[in-house]
Amino acid sequence: MKPNLGITDKNLKAIHGILNNVLADGNILYIKLRKFHWNLSGDNFMELHLLFESQYTAVAQGIDDVAERISTLGGTAIGTTSEFASQSQLKETPGKVPTNQEMLKELVSDHESIVRALRKFVDDTDEKYKDAGTSDFLTELMQEHEKMAWKLRKYFKD
């Protein structure tokens, strides 16, 4: 049964697309956090190991929430690694294991890229597509990524 939520079908389709892009970014970041978590070594090993674990756990919850939001709005969530890779703005580096500092920089950059995209999506879903619920949902997700980026940035001196 199609939802009757006061949002036009055209707008819902656009919102599903936005949310699937957010889902793709979340999955690529999740995979990257796991890879980095598994391949840490040297200074701050345990501290970073636990930090990355806490972040991939939070990102996994966000991923599930995004997929459920898509379903709530009558859409279909993408779900394959090829779809995630093709729809994400984030880039992977197969076969390479960065240093701990490079991992931190890459993760900060990824979180901040997600935040910038979410900031635009918050405005679009509210103003352009008339969906305050998704706008609020994305605002909360944006705040989570801002906080995760902040924690990672603290490993660098200004």
Image (tube, rainbow, N blue to C red):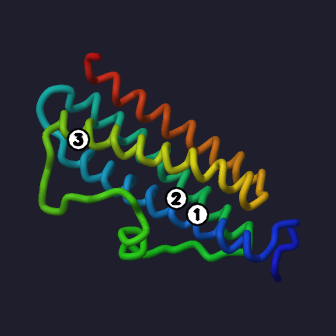
Mark 3 nearby-residue class (10 Å; few <14, some 14–19, many ≥20): many
Q: Residue at x 33, y 41 (%)?
A: 109
Q: Nearer the viewer, residue 128 or 103?
A: 128
- Amino acid type, residue under disc 2 in the picture: Val
Q: Which residue is mark 3?
A: 103
Instruction: Give the quarter of the image for residue 9.
Output: bottom right
* 146 relative to 132, above or below: above
* 80 relative to 35, above or below: below
Q: Which residue is mark 2?
A: 22
Q: Which residue is mark 1?
A: 18
C-alpha separation, residue under disc 3 versus residue under disc 1:
27 Å
The N terminus lies in quadrant = bottom right
Query: Looking at the image, do the residues carrying marks 1 and 2 touch, with CB atoms under 8 Å apart?
Result: yes
Mark 1 nearby-residue class (10 Å; few <14, some 14–19, many ≥20): some
Residue 34 position, x and y percent, is 31, 51
C-alpha separation, residue under disc 1 versus residue under disc 2:
6 Å
Left/right placement of residue 66 relative to residue 50 reads right
- Amino acid type, residue under disc 1 in the picture: Ile
Give the SS element for disc 3. Answer: helix
Left/right placement of residue 42 relative to residue 34 reads left
| Earlier-in-chain disc, 3 versus 1 | 1
Residue 63 position, x and y percent, is 53, 57
Left/right placement of residue 132 relative to residue 25 reads right
Mark 2 nearby-residue class (10 Å; few <14, some 14–19, many ≥20): many
* 156 relative to 132, above or below: above
